[in-house]
Structure formats: structure tokens, C-alpha cells
Amino acid sequence: MDNKEIMLEKLAEVAVRVGANVQKDQIVLISSPLHAYPLVKLIQKKAYSIGAKKVYVDWYDDELDRNYYTFAKEKTLEEVPDWQIAKRKYFVDNNTCRISIDSTNPNAMQGIDLRKVMCANKAIGKKMKFWRDHYSASKSQWTIIAYPSDEWSQSVFKDLQASDAWDKLFDAIMYTSRITPDNNPIEDWYKHTKSLEKRSKIMNEYHFKSLHFQNSLGTNLDIELVNNHIWAGGGEMSANGVYFVPNIPTEEIFTMPHKDKVNGKVVSTKPLNYQGSLIKDFYLVFKDGKVVDYNAKEGFDALKSLIELDEGSSRLGEVALISYDSPISNLNILFNDTLFDENASCHLALGDAYPMNVLNGTTMKKKELSSLGANSSITHVDFMFGSSDMEITGTTLDNQKVTIFKKGNFVF
């Protein structure tokens, strides 16, 4: 095998053994674009080799989606067939672990009426909320990995020929996923997750009441955290007692903001790819937790459709911290993809909060979580706002001020 084949096999192994940590006799669902079939085959084989009961594949394709949104009537977009719901319920009821392959085309929906996309998202989001709730509460394992596409690679490396751009993106994905032709990625991932857990432990010991963010770009934001919040990072434990790593790659530690206690302005530092549309150079202004003003130099309609998707999509569900001096950031590559760009920069998420980020949250009902300040939405979308001069100050419950970030990086 050449180096590419060796690394692709290792990525499949990381997806199965580290990311989803597939258990014997467990059902596996792979979600993948059609062109990523070489990786899908390797993941399926690896999952079966360690004892998976059954491996299903959900295929999708950007061009098919474009055709759907272009030609389908609005009434059709609002329909969610019973069989689609039953299929998802089967997976939830049978403790299925999910492996999603991210291979985005940042411009997949360029020129499409975003009102139609939002219409479909609202319909699906409401009907499938049980699906999002199940995995956001980590009741079963899930993970996201990446594979290049022609469109994605050429959006990242515009000056290269198609095949050279694909190869360079492939190498970047492997590097950030901690895979080389010669290493033991399972061992390397164990060490990495332990380092992120150590930093989370330090943050949890402070029991911060709030965080203040400020930089020269215009971010001046206060975020109050929910009581008994939990910082997490690296891997997490599913409800069935299996340790897994949701994002390959990952560099973040994250927790839960109070949905009603965010005030000030945040300015983005990287584009956001939302539903196949790029949103660039945007800002959000919060008052009592809700976005009350916003704008973007490019992709305003996409930003508007996100913020107006439902009540919760205009509030925060996550705050994540990442040093500016980090492996992905140091590559100095704009991936135009949230999985990578969010791990190069501090980020926030509009939409649903993760129940795992508050004490006993995964056993609580939605009403209990809401009473604590957890946001609820049919979406969860990360956007990046970290910078080389970001200053972060935490305020403890006894009103002590603690410097967390200086010049874009953790001080501990």
C-alpha cells in the first residue's frame, strides 16, 4: 500500500475505535457523500471486524440536494414522511452509534433560494428533534471525520490544479486528525484527549460565574455561565458507559452559556459555512441572551435564515475555548469548514445546548434544563471569533477576576 492508502485505513480505524468507539453487537450508521465511498468501505469493514452487529449507510449528494431545493414545491419541502421518522426512531431505540463523514462543498447552495432551505430545515428540525436530543445528550456514541471533495479542496487551495488541491487537503485532514504513515494514531489520540481533559479540569475547579471576551476587532462580550456548568473536551462518556470522541479533529474545551445572560458584541474571525452558503465578516449583538442586531459583508440572507430559524437559534448554546497557537491554527489554512475552522479558534454556537455541559444534565427533561438556562433549538451552528489578541477574563462566584487568555492563548 502507498502512504495514502495506509493513512486512509488509519482514519477508518480512528473513526471506529476512537471516534465512535463501536462496541460488539452494536448497530452503526455511516452518513456519507457519494464520493467518499473509499472511506465508507474501510469503515464498514473495520466496524464488522471488531464485532458490529450491522452497518447501515445513509448516502447524500450536493447536486441531488441542489436539484431538490431548486425544483421542489414549498409544500413538498414541508413534508417529512413517516418512514423517515420511523427509520430514525429505529436507530435511536437500538442504541445506534453514528459516524458522519464531512466532505463539504462550501458553495453547494450558492444561488438557491435560502427561504426554501429554511422551510425544509424547520419541518425536518421539528419532526426529528428527538434524534438531535438523543445524540446531543450523548445517549449513544457519535463522531464526525472528514474526507476531501474536489469542490472543497479547490475552495481551500484556489491556485492549485484540482488533483494537487485534493492531495493537499487530504494531507491537511490527516495531519489534523493525528495520522501519519508511521504513527500509532490510537495511542496519540489517547494522549491528546487526556491533555484536553486536564485543561477542562482546571476550568471546572474555578467555578466561573461569567466570562468576558475582548479584542481589537470589536468583540466586547459578557457571557454568564449556567450554575453547575461543566467544561468538557476531547472525549466524553455516553449514557451507556462508552467513552468516545465526537470530533476528529478536536482542540477545544467547551461549556454551556446561560441562554438569557449574554450581552455585548461579537465579531467573527473566520467565514461560516451554513447550509452550503458562506457567511463572511459578520457580527452579532446580544441583549439579555438574544441577538438583537447583526450584519454580514457576504451571506447576509444565510445569516438571517439561521438567526430566524426558531427562537433558540438567536441565542447561544455553547462557548468553546482554543488557543490561537494550536496545531490547526498554525497550519494557516482557511478550511471553509466548521469542523476544522472551529478547532483553530475560540467559537460560539447559536442554537441547542449540550446537556452534558451541566451537572446531571443528561438525565434531565428539557423543562428542567431550560429552568437552569440551557438553550433549546432545532439547530446548533458554531461560528469562530478567536483572534491573536483575544483577552478572556473569568469572574468566579466570589467575584474574583482570573485571566484565562492573554494575547490569544491560555495562560495555563
Image: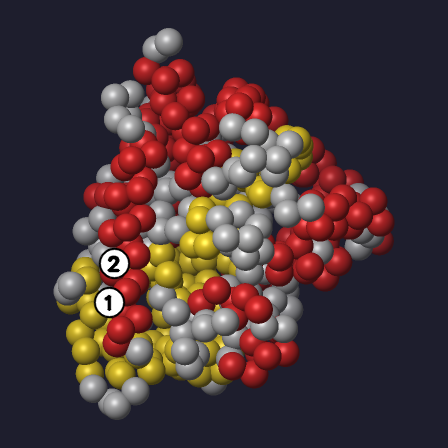
Place of residue 387 in the rendered image (x, y in percent of width and height, measured from the top left): 25, 59
| Above or below, 244 relative to 267 | above
Quadrant housing the C terminus: bottom left
198 vs 81, left or right, is left
Helix, strand or loop status at disc 1: helix
Disc 2 residue type (three-letter): Lys
Point 53% across, 47% down: residue? 141
The residue located at (72%, 36%) in the rendering is 67
Task: Report which quarter residue 192 is drawn in.
Answer: top left
In-front residue for pair 352/276: 352
Left or right of 227, for residue 127: right
The x and y percentages for residue 313 are: 57, 67
Quadrant containing the N terminus in the rendered view: top left
Q: Percent x, y for residue 63?
A: 65, 32
Contact, mark 1 vs mark 2 (Cβ under 8 Å): yes
Left or right: where 376 falls relative to 217: right
Q: Is residue 26 visible?
A: yes
> Which mark identifies residue 198?
2
Q: Which label is found at residue 202?
A: 1
Residue under the point 74% across and 46% down: 90
Q: Residues within 10 Å of mark 1 (few under 14, many from 20)?
A: few
Q: Residues within 10 Å of mark 2 (few under 14, many from 20)?
A: some
